[in-house]
Image (cartoon, rainbow, N blue to C red):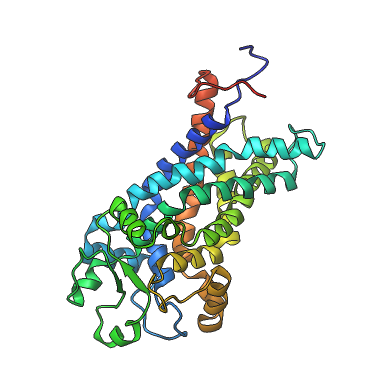
Amino acid sequence: MSSSSPYQLSALEGFVSGALGACVAVTFTNPMEVAKTRLQLDGELRSKGSPKAYTNTLDVLRKTARSEGFRACQKGLGAAYTYQFALNGSRLGFYEPLRQSIGSLSGQDPSKVQLWSSISAGALSGVIGAILGNPLFLVKARLQAYSSARDSALGKSTTNSKSTPVISANPQMKSSFSTHPTQHAYKSAVDGLHQIFKAEGFKGLMRGVDAAMMRTAMGSSVQLPAYNYAKTNLAPYFSPDSFWLYIASSSFSGLCVLGAMQPADTALTRMYNQSNQPGKRLYKNPIDCLWKTVQIEGFTGLYKGSTAHFFRIAPHTIITLVANEAISQWCTSNSLVLFINLPEK
């Protein structure tokens, strides 16, 4: 390998690099994902002013740790790790090959970054990851939404794998939350996948995939384009390969992702968590979910959990992209081939 032709990571190597970076990030940000999920479901389809179980992000974490133990703040972490391989491995690993292919097909120089090809590649790679990772995100969301403390307050078994309604321990709130939202009590991610497949088959594992595709396409279409845009325009103000350049670019990217996909993220959480029993489903599809949320809870209902989402997605984006850059550079500088590269056709 000549020094004038730097080694380029293959799609598979990029997949692993992106996935490892995301797994590093999710270790630190998963508690915020738990808080975000519970806030998005708190007061679901209830008008403003209705009683709620939580007041803010810190209140969720405090009550969760106090009533369910500190480990409950890391619920769904195992599923999150596996999901990161599917989603971010695809999103970061397939982005560059797709961007170059789209550029070549349009007659553009693939080495030059074009806005529209970057957005298209980001959306497509995100959709691929959303489809591959949907069963894992589904069970992760249900694990994070489930509160054993609420079931205990109602005298319910916390090991029952059947769906049970989420009801606050506050007696005054019991009747108002008696029908929705729903809880799914799984022993683990594997148990959750088994229970879903047993009850609903493969179709059950792909529940909400349309919402997942919408959410991820919106987020992915801006994540890497925003990161590359910021990195390119901020480069003159930093030394080459500066760590702070990656931090600044990742922060800008995280803000863009949050603004783009928060409503879709709320819809996805609610689609995943709703009851699978006939006649008890609240939403027909993601658009119906968004419409009903705005009708009953107001526009701000779409942004429930946005603070927790920001404190998850900002550090998650920073750690993911910085770790991905570091891993990619290490692989490149050491000419490390993670997989046997197939000859290009």
Q: Position of residue 53 (x, y in %)?
A: 33, 76
Q: Position of residue 92 (x, y in %)?
A: 56, 40
Q: Position of residue 19 (x, y in %)?
A: 47, 39
Q: How many marks?
A: 0
In the picture, measured across the screen, residue 275 lies left or right of residue 12, that is left
Q: Residue furthest right?
A: 107
Residue under the point 56% across and 45% down: 250
| Most foreground residue, 197 or 78 | 197
| Most foreground residue, 8 or 189 | 189
One can see residue 256 in this view: no
Residue under the point 45% across and 55% down: 312
In the picture, measured across the screen, residue 177 lies left or right of residue 213, that is left
Question: Which quadrant of the view contains residue 150?
Answer: bottom left
Q: Position of residue 342 (x, y in %)?
A: 57, 22
Question: Which quadrant of the view contains residue 46?
Answer: bottom left
One can see residue 20 in this view: yes
Image quadrant where one finds the N terminus: top right
Residue 155 position (above or below residue 341) = below
